Every structure is written in structure tokens, then in C-alpha cells.
Image: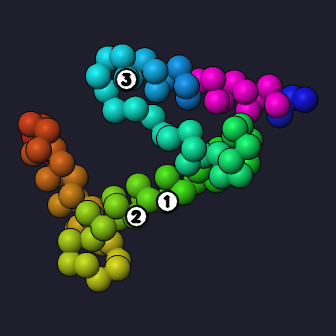
Amino acid sequence: MKNGWITAGLVATLALTAGAAAAQGHRQGPDFAAMDTDGDGAVTLAEFTAFAQTRAATRAERMFTRVDADGDGRVTMAEIEAAREARGARHGQRQTD
């Protein structure tokens, strides 16, 4: 029963967040159907967790790819520092020593 309440709370939070974002013209949250993998009209904690893990892995891969400047599949400290400086420059920030 406790997991049911937790799941209901998570789903309600997602729905409210997506609705508020849409009302303000922001990008909507995740597609409910994408989370509801068994198509039963409800998202379980396991479905939500799997969706969140997949999304996090995708974001991590994009971030890694951006930082891996030479594309060798490895990130060095120099690449991390260069990416940090480039990000700061894009956001109008100066790096200080």
C-alpha cells in the first residue's frame, strides 16, 4: 500500500509539473505513455525508476560526448577544464584563478 501512495504521489507531481510548465509556455515533462511501459494506465515505481535511469544515462552520454573533444572515448582533465571554460564563456562568465 505504501508503494502505491508513493507511486501516486510521483505521478501526481509529474502531472502537476508538466501542467504548470505547459501553462507557462515551457517544455512539458516526460510523456506519460513512455513511462507506462505495460500500458495499464498507471506508472509503477519500477516503471518510473527505469524511465528516470534511461533518461539519466542518455544525458550522461551526451555530456560525455561534448567533453570528449578528441572523440577517443576517454575524458582527460584537460578536456574537462576546456569544456568548463567554454561553458563559462557561453554563459558570460570569466574563469578566475
User: Which three-letter amino acid code belongs to the residue tagged 2?
Assistant: Glu
Taking the image as shown, residue 73 lies to the left or right of residue 16, namely left
Residue 32 in the image: state x and y as whole percent.
56, 39
Q: Position of residue 56 (x, y in %)?
A: 49, 53
Q: Secondary structure at mark 3?
A: helix
Q: Please check the rendered image and state whether residue 8 is part of the magenta-colored stretch, yes or no.
A: yes
Asked if the residue under mark 3 is in contact with the one under mark 1, i.e. CB atoms within 8 Å, the reply is no
Point out the frontmost of discs 2 and 3. 3
Can you see residue 68?
yes
Locate residue 11: give its quadrant.
top right
Marks 2,1: beta carbons within 8 A? yes
- What residue is shown at x 27% (from left), y 64% (from top)? 67
Q: Is residue 45 visible?
A: no
In the image, which disc is placed on residue 61?
Answer: 2
Q: Crowding near pointer 1: few (<14 within 10 Å), some, many (20+)? A: few
- Residue depicted at x 49% and y 59%: 57
Q: Which mark is residue 57?
A: 1
Q: Main secondary structure of the magenta part?
A: helix
Q: Position of residue 1 (x, y in %)?
A: 90, 29
**Placement of 21 over or under 56, stated as above or below:** above
User: Relative to residue 51, is residue 63 drawn left or right?
Assistant: left
Give the residue number, with chain letter if any, for mark 3: 22
Provide the residue span drawn in magenta.
4-13
